[in-house]
Image (spheres, grey):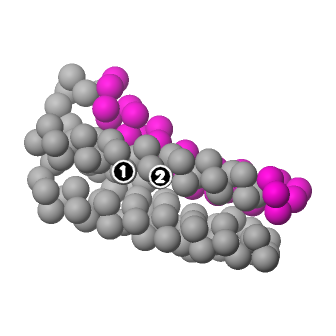
Amino acid sequence: MTRYYMDLICWQKAMDLVTEIYRLTKQLPKEEVFGLASQLCRAAVSIPSNIAEGQGRLSKGEFRTFLGNARGSLSELETQIIICKNLDYIAEQEAARLLEMASEVGRILNGLIASMKK
């Protein structure tokens, strides 16, 4: 098991996704600052935060639980990206790019979770 969360590829990719989500929220209408923009940022930040917190726990079981929480936040974020696209706040291709980034994080997370069950 990796001894430091920053070494985890899923944490690194999740941090890249957070950066992109913060860039996205700067483009949203001002009336969304306390609505969708806030939700997007919270969900995005929650992903690497849960990975880091889980890595800091004492057992694999606890780590797995936090990875599950990260996966839940990822699903929430994907939903919010789709909402942005549906409201025409972002272009189709931007939504697709962000959803692909999210999908990659999800695949890596799923692999890490599966490797811990062995």
In the depicted view, which residue is nearer to us: 79 or 58?
79
At mark 1, the secondary structure is helix
Relative placement, left or right, of 107 versus 68 is left
**Is residue 95 among the parts visible in the rendering?**
yes
In the depicted view, which residue is nearer to us: 21 or 88?
88
Residue lying furthest right in this view?
58
**Is residue 89 among the parts visible in the rendering?**
no
Range drawn in magenta: 34-62
Separation of disc 2 and disc 1 at Cα? Answer: 6 Å
Residue 16, percent from left and from top:
43, 63
Residue named by callout 1: 78
Residue 21, percent from left and from top:
34, 50
Q: What residue is at 29 percent from the left and 47 percent from the top?
A: 81
The amino acid type, in three-letter code, at marker 2 is: Leu
Q: For residue 59, what is the image quadrant?
A: bottom right
Q: For residue 92, what is the image quadrant?
A: bottom left
Q: What residue is at 43 percent from the left and 44 percent from the top?
A: 76
Residue 105, percent from left and from top:
47, 66
- Say the numbered circle drawn on residue 74: 2
